[in-house]
Image (cartoon, rainbow, N blue to C red):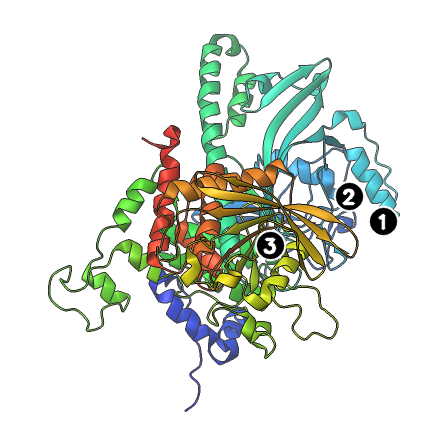
Amino acid sequence: NPTPVHTPIRSAIPILRLPEYVATLKRDSGIGISEEYESIETPNDLTWKHANMEENRPKNRYANIIAYDQSRVVLNEISRIPGSDYINANFIDGYQKKSAYIATQGPLPGTFYDFWRMVWEQNSRVIVMMTHLEERARIKCDQYWPNRGKEVFTLQQQQQCQQQEYNSKVNYDINYTTVPTYTVIIKSVQEFAYYTLRTFILQRNYETNLLETDSAAFNQHQSINDSNMNIEQREIKQFQFTAWPDYGTPDYPQPLLLFIRRVSQVRSQLMHHLQQERLINDEKVNSRELKLSQSSDIHNSMNLNLSDEIGPLIVHCSAGVGRTGAFIVIDSQLERLKHENSVDIFGAVCRMRAQRNFMVQTEEQYAFLYDVFIEAAEVHGTEVTAHGLYNHVVKLRQPVPTCILAGYNLLPNGLQDNNHLTSSIKISSLELEFKRLNRNLINKRQITTALTYDNKTKNRDLDILPYESNRVCLSLIRGVNGSDYINASYIDGYRKSRAYIATQTPLPHTVDDFWRLIWECNSPIIVAFSDARDMNLIPTDINQYWPSDRSTRYQNLMVEPMVEYNMPHFILREFRLTNTTDGQSRTLRQFQLHGWPHDSIVPKSAEAIIDLIGQVHKTQIQFGQDGPITVHCNTGSGRTGVFICLSILLDRMRSEGMVDMFLITRMLRTQRINTIQTSDQYAFCYAATLEYLASFDHYMS
């Protein structure tokens, strides 16, 4: 039979139909994706006259990536400087909002001043950066902010840079004191596993005698008068996504979804804050109304500055079309999903292409957009605020109506009666959520090394094996096949990639490998979930893989027990590790939890594991140890997963005030198979998070 020809849908796709639609697109090596991507058209009446002006060509990072005249961001013109209103940037419409975004290239040294001028003139408060400064040994974006302290950006510096870079002479008759300068001050830098958040103070510096009025003193941003200089300032947030690989697209969509959610959350908070400021400023304006009424110009100028909302979200990568386009499609269509339960990826890309060329630059990026929305459909509605977590969990514990169960194919014999709930099958929403953890979970990772002849016997459970892309690779021992293998996986944390190592409790013949892992990965802490009473689960001779009373040698590593503390919820042991080949030594700390015996699916109390998590991370910070925390249980998935998942959940909740147990667990399962193995463990994570919340009165109503 001939293969049916795929016809792209030209309208929005209901989210419930999306998995089926994407499956159709991906048949026959993705021919449907190819056809749909190739059918994207760009209007033929667009022009780029300003981008091609001689004075503006050096401002384009790439000769073929230009700004259409119809949608370009027009800067305020500087007198006597041709092309001073040009920057390689375009307005892009969002969901039911015109010019919601500005898509632009990564700034060049010769456009730094114009970039910050654009940020100020457009009243933008958030910048999204979708690239590293350098990738594959090529500069993708020049650093337009200071590493520390502050940096002043001036028109004169920009012109000098253009002269040096392009050997062009710029002899404009201009008094540089008549144009503002921009100062960027680093306020804070926060690094997370998948992105970096920088907070800048952006100052616009004017000679006082150039200002027409002093109305800025009552503006929504702060004004500082210093001798003859007037300084206005605003706070700017820059989000740099650091998990996009040098080649292709991310393997999994969860990190990007979390990132976009965070950007949206911060923008909403900024909007709320500025609206509150505006109300305060309006009161100030009203109180001075009699004085200001003498000058209608001052009054009008003031009202113009008190905008109801912040300016467009500025998004850039290197060229400002590929990853930038992907971000804008995802962000705008997530907004559509919230309001209409549908997405229109094809239409969104078509509309963007009419505003900036090459948006969503490759077919691979286009296919990735569908992967993102398959995931977005699965996690839709699973994120809640810390305030709303209690009510969310109460709802999750309620039985699910039969009609919904049938929709998830969880009833073996279909509908059993006409009641909303069957008497024979009662399943809670929480159990249903657990059963959905692997549904439509994209799996691009392979397992190969774990299954070789030399390595098979090193695994406790052949169903729990490390993926090739994030397995811990030991150093090779000459002449020993498979010597680089151990059943262990790097796991990303909330603030750091590869923050943890998830591994199985060592087998008798892998104890040496386990200690090699600790040394070679510079792991300063072990979290052990092999209770001392697990003797009937794990053979006695390997249950305790560490020495108790005297130094023991494991290949080239000497392990010396130093001290042991018996705490209410755990045992803390300290060891000195010495490499016998070079004499280097380190201190290792091992935490072993009480109260989670092998015959118990979950710990006896949430308090114990919350205390353990707190002490482990406090110890890591206290001793300034930056290596990954090694966590192990029988298979390195169940109890290990509970510890890591809770660590991430609590850290994120403290930082953002948000909880998404479902998405975090799915993300962990893309890094290690079956992380959190049972619905009871999954429910325990919810319960432990609630117990943690209960200790903070400001989260509770």
Residue where numbered disc 2 is placed:
110
- Say which quarter of the image contains residue 295: top right
Q: What percent of the width, then of the height, locates residue 288?
A: 49, 10
Which residue is most to the front?
A: 549
Contact (Cβ within 8 Å) of mark 2 with mark 1 = yes
559 lies left or right of 153: left
In the picture, the disc for residue 263 is none
The three-letter code of the residue at mark 2 reads Gly
Sequence-wise first label, 1 or 3: 1
Sequence-wise first label, 3 or 2: 2
Report helix, strand or loop for mark 1.
helix
Residue where numbered disc 1 is placed:
166
Q: Nearer the viewer, mark 1 or mark 3?
A: 3
Image quarter hosting the N terminus: bottom left
Q: Which sits in the foreground, 620 or 124? A: 620
Q: What percent of the width, then of the height, locates residue 232?
A: 63, 23
Report helix, strand or loop for mark 2.
helix
Q: Which sits in the foreground, 466 or 29? A: 466
